[in-house]
Amino acid sequence: MFNHERAQRQMSQARAAQHLGASQQWISQVERGIVAPTTDAIERLFAIFDLKVILDVEPTGTGLRALDEEIDEVRSLSDDDRLAVVDTFRRAFDELAPVPWVVSGRLGAFLQGAPLRVYRLDLAVAEPDLDRLAGVFESHQCDRWNESLLDYYGAPVHPRLPGPMRWLLGPNELRVEVADRLPASITVGVAGRYLPVRPLADIEVRDPGIATVMRRVRTRVIHS
C-alpha cells in the first residue's frame, strides 16, 4: 500500500527515504515485504503523505468472501438494472416531495457508484421539518417500527414522538436521521430525477458497514 501511495505522488524511494530519515534500501525492503516495520514506523511512513494509519477490524474467510460476492454482484448490474434499483423508491420520493431531505446510507453510496446492495431508503432530515414529515406519514400508508412487537404496527408515526426512526412507507423501509440542519449534499441525476445525496466520504464516516465494503473495494484495486 505504501508503494501505491508513493507511486500516486510520483515520489522516488530515495525521496521517501530522505523525508523519513531512513535508507533507500530499507524503503525498498519494506515495499517488497522483506522487512516488517513496527507500528510506529508504519505511522511515520504514511505521515510523509499526510495520511493517518487507523487500526480496524476487517472480515476474513467467509466474511471476506461475502464482501467480494456483494461487490462482484453489484458491479455486474447493467445500467437498466441499476436504474431499476433506484426506481424501487420512486413512490417514496414522490410522496416525500413536500419535505426537504438528503439521501444517505446504502442508496446514497450506490448512487455514487459504490458496489453495494440496497435494502432500504435512508434519509437525513432537518429537525424543523419533522412536522412536515409527519404530515406525509399521516396522509399516506405508513407504519412505524414497534420494538415490542418487532413489527411495523401499533406505534405512533409522528417522528417527534419516542420510538425508532424506522417506518414502512408503502413498500419501502425508511430510516430517518435527524440533524439541526440538512447536511451538505451533491446532486445526482438519475432517470430524469435529481436527488440531493450525501457525499460518499461522509456516508462512510457515518456507516461502518459501508466503510468496510469500500475499504475492500480499494484494497482490490491496489492489488489488482
Image (spheres, rainbow, N blue to C red):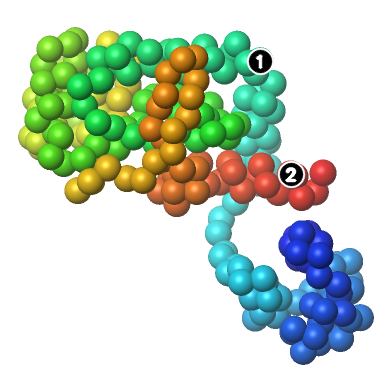
Residue 185 lies left or right of residue 111; in this view the side is left
At label 2, the amino acid type is Arg
Residue 164 in percent (x, y) is at: 20, 34
The residue shown at (76%, 59%) is 8
Q: Foreground: 135 or 167? A: 135
Residue 217 in percent (x, y) is at: 66, 42
Q: Please state which of the two labelled residues, at mark 1 or mark 2, is closer to the viewer.
A: 1
At label 1, the amino acid type is Ser
Residue 186 lies left or right of residue 145; in this view the side is right
The residue shown at (64%, 75%) is 47
Q: Which residue is mark 1?
A: 78
Residue 49 lies left or right of residue 204; in this view the side is right
Describe the element under mark 2 as helix, strand or loop. helix
Q: Quadrant of residue 79?
A: top right
Is 197 located above or below residue 10 in the figure? above
Query: From this viewpoint, is residue 39 visible?
Result: no
Q: Separation of disc 1 and disc 2 at Cα?
A: 21 Å
Query: From this viewpoint, is residue 173 visible?
Result: yes
Residue 197 in percent (x, y) is at: 41, 35
Residue 218 lies left or right of residue 143; in this view the side is right
Residue 179 in percent (x, y) is at: 23, 46
